[in-house]
Amino acid sequence: MSEYDNVCRGSLKLKGVSDHKIKKKKKRKDKDKELDKYLQSLAETPGTSEQQPAQRADTRTKAEIAFEKRKEKKMAQQILERATKSHKERIVEFNQHLDNLTEHFDIPKVSWTK
């Protein structure tokens, strides 16, 4: 009698899982129906999209409104600053920045033969 006489042979049988193969459901029709509904809602909304901003009341606080204004102003300044520099000026500035970095960020040599 060997050590392996008591071993169960065959596939594992798990609790709660049937032996039948799982059949995948086709959801193509559901996706087509959802797509049709979405396209219909888009076709109906052009007239209503113009009316919605007029109906909504501004519920933001004074601080939120001030923040938005400052944010827009800062974005406009950044755009103007970027527009005034040419590509060559940006490259020169970037190279100067890389020169100012410490050698800690340099890639170390791998080969000693060169």
Image (cartoon, rainbow, N blue to C red):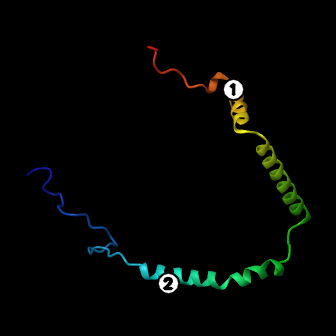
Which of the numbered marks, if any, corresponds to residue 79? none
> Which residue in the rendered view is the most extreme toward the top?
113
Image x and y of residue 70, in percent: 87, 55
Which of the numbered marks, if any, corresponds to residue 33? 2
Q: Residue at x 78, y 49 (%)?
A: 79
Q: Nearer the viewer, residue 106 or 83?
A: 83
Which of the numbered marks, if any, corresponds to residue 101? 1
| Left or right of 83 on screen, residue 102 | left
The secondary element bearing badge 2 is classed as helix
Q: Residues within 10 Å of mark 2 (few under 14, many from 20)?
A: few
Image x and y of residue 48, in percent: 73, 83
Residue 22 found in image quarter: bottom left
Residue 56 found in image quarter: bottom right
Q: Residue at x 76, y 39 (%)?
A: 85
Q: Residue at x 37, y 78 (%)?
A: 25
The secondary element bearing badge 1 is classed as loop
Q: Residue at x 76, y 80 (%)?
A: 50
Image x and y of residue 34, in percent: 52, 81
Q: Which amino acid type corresponds to the residue marked 1 in the rendered image?
A: Leu
Q: Nearer the viewer, residue 37 or 94?
A: 94
Q: Nearer the viewer, residue 81 or 53?
A: 81
